Image (cartoon, rainbow, N blue to C red):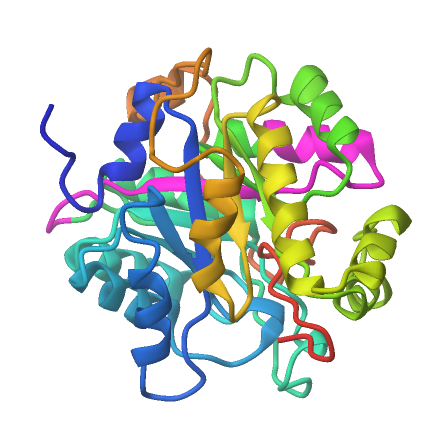
């Protein structure tokens, strides 16, 4: 079977019911993308797509749109992350139209981290929309209309939208509402925040995600040391690295290698529970292939028993109750637990 064209590889894998593998890179903090591209090249052929973060932790970096295009020029399929924090609906629509024209198809719709968490705390946040309304907006653009219902005279979009989810959220009812709202708004896949409680993930898959016909990719984060884990526990709301893991890292002769083993064990656990994994290894993306090898994912193959997922088209979304965007006229507060998949390194919130 011929390989899917660039931009459609993730969507094709979702439709085929394959076990999905994605990873994440950060755009450069400067004009030279060489390090980002070097890391991303090491992932080519090992993942279905590579996420490009959009101001993760509200730290200023190169545009995720530009960085995603640079990845695809290297033959690496990108997941273009779009956060609502920095752009109003006019800017968001303009960027999404540009993404389509530049060959991007995968979009992860995010609300965005609060500016106070980042390196420009005095910046003015926008939050004209949040992630659910952004998903509805993408659906409407795919339907050939802008946010005011006016036709896109130069062609509808064909974007493949996804969303973030946090199965470890402290509010189970809130988690269920947000997941169901994102499915209804048109999310075709979900990538989770950092997962350490796999019993909780199992419960989420059984009680909330079951029957949604949407793949969930468990967020696997490479912990480099006990200090790294402790930093996350202190500084990332909702994150809780269990004491036994922190102790393993503290007692290890080589904490980084122990962190690789822990991540691989988590990949193995996720393979028994959900439909994919999303790997985060901040500034050590070169170690992701090793994690995948140890986790039993040396090649991209369909997972035994993986659920086949049908991606909803515009008509199907409408039949299932997806609505045209009900876009607010004023700023929208950021819902808890709806930030970009985290990118944390010990001693820094970047």
Residue 150 lies, with reference to residue 82, above or below; the image says: above
Question: What is the magenta range?
Answer: 153-180
Q: In which quarter of the image is residue 137?
A: top left
The structure residue drawn at horizontal position 34% and vertical position 45%, both measured from the top left corner, is: 46
The structure residue drawn at horizontal position 70% and vertical position 51%, both measured from the top left corner, is: 335
Q: In which quarter of the image is residue 25?
A: bottom left
Q: Does the magenta stretch include residue 232?
A: no
Nearest the eye: 327 or 10: 10
The structure residue drawn at horizontal position 29% and vertical position 71%, both measured from the top left corner, is: 66
Nearest the eye: 205 or 304: 304
Q: Does the magenta stretch include residue 177?
A: yes
Would residue 332 be visible to someone looking at this image?
no
Q: In which quarter of the image is residue 347?
A: bottom right
Which of the image's four quarters has the N terminus? top left
Would residue 110 be visible to someone looking at this image?
yes
Which of the image's four quarters has the C terminus? bottom right
- Rendering coords of residue 89 (x, y %): 43, 60
- Rendering coords of residue 314 (x, y %): 30, 26
- Rendering coords of residue 254 (x, y %): 70, 64
Left of 56 or right of it: where is 97? left
Left of 350 or right of it: where is 293? left
Nearest the eye: 289 or 93: 289
Residue 229 lies, with reference to residue 268, above or below; the image says: below
């Amino acid at each position: 079977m011929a390989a899917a064209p660039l931009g459609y590889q993730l969507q094709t894998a979702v439709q085929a019911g394959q076990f999905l593998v994605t990873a994440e890179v950060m755009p450069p903090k400067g004009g030279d993308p060489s390090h980002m591209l070097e890391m991303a090249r090491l992932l080519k052929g090992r993942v279905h797509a590579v996420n490009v973060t959009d101001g993760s932790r509200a730290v200023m970096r190169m545009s995720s749109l530009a960085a995603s295009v640079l990845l695809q020029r290297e033959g690496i399929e990108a997941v273009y992350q779009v956060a609502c924090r920095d752009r109003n609906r006019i800017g968001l629509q303009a960027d999404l139209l540009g993404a389509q024209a530049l060959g991007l198809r995968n979009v992860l719709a995010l609300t965005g981290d609060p500016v106070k968490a980042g390196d420009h705390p005095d910046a003015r946040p926008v939050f004209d929309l949040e992630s659910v309304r952004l998903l509805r907006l993408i659906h409407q653009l795919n339907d050939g209309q802008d946010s005011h219902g006016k036709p896109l005279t130069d062609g509808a979009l064909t974007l493949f939208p996804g969303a973030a989810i946090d199965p470890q959220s402290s509010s189970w009812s809130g988690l269920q509402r947000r997941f169901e709202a994102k499915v209804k708004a048109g999310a075709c896949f979900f990538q989770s925040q950092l997962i350490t409680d796999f019993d909780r993930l199992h419960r989420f898959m059984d009680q909330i995600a079951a029957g949604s016909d949407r793949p969930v990719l468990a967020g696997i984060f490479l912990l480099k040391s006990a200090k790294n884990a402790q930093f996350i526990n202190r500084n990332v709301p909702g994150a809780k690295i269990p004491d036994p893991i922190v102790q393993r890292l503290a007692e290890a002769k080589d904490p980084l290698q122990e962190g690789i083993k822990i991540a691989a064990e988590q990949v193995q656990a996720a393979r028994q529970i959900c439909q994919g994994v999303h790997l985060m290894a901040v500034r050590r993306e070169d170690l992701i292939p090793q994690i995948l090898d140890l986790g039993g994912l040396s090649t991209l193959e369909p997972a035994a028993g993986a659920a086949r997922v049908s991606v909803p088209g515009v008509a199907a979304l409408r039949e299932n109750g997806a609505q045209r965007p009900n876009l607010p006229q004023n700023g929208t507060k950021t819902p808890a637990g709806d930030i970009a998949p985290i990118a944390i390194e010990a001693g820094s919130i970047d």
